[in-house]
Image (tube, rainbow, N blue to C red):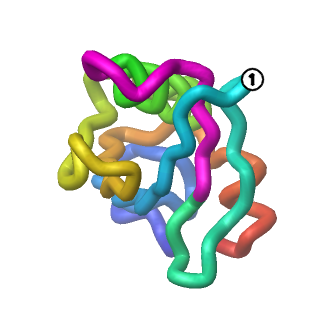
Amino acid sequence: MEADGGGGAPGVRDPFFLPVVIVPGAVETVVAGRLPDGAWRIRVKAPPMEGRANAELVRFVASEFGVPRSSVSISSGSRSRRKLLRILGAVLRPGWLQRDGQ
């Protein structure tokens, strides 16, 4: 992927869409690999209640991409474990994304 001149991280489109499957209630929030369909499995330490897991997911992804939380939104799947995240103005390209060749 190439940047479109939006001032984001090299190789990250703006907006960047990230398909994820979350596993709530983990010991720590970590990227746990990539699924065959291309979605990233992310374990989040928050429980799946009252939006806590979604909030932790947004916090973690914002930190990984170097953007404020307001730049990360759930485009689809807010009530599902499978989600599509929209990330605006990514400053960083996480190591796990680089290793996978994205």
Q: Which residues are magenta?
A: 41-51
Of residues 91 and 47, the one nearer the viewer is 47
Q: Is residue 2 magenta?
A: no
Residue 43 falls in which quadrant of the image?
top right
Name the residue rendered at 60%, 55% in the picture. 41
Residue type marked 1:
Val
Vertically, is 22 above or below 13? above
Vertically, is 13 above or below 48? below
Of residues 79 and 102, the one nearer the viewer is 79
Name the residue rendered at 53%, 34% in the picture. 24
Principal secondary structure, stretch drawn in magenta: loop
Vertically, is 1 above or below 9? below
For this view, does 68 lie left or right of residue 34? left
Name the residue rendered at 22%, 42% in the picture. 78
Horizontal and vertical percent position of residue 27 = 74, 23
Of residues 98 and 79, the one nearer the viewer is 79
Q: Quadrant of the C terminus?
A: bottom right
Residue 65 falls in which quadrant of the image?
top right
Horizontal and vertical percent position of residue 45 = 61, 22
Horizontal and vertical percent position of residue 98 = 73, 61
For this view, does 43 lie left or right of residue 20? right
Q: Which residue is mark 1?
A: 27
Name the residue rendered at 40%, 44% in the picture. 7
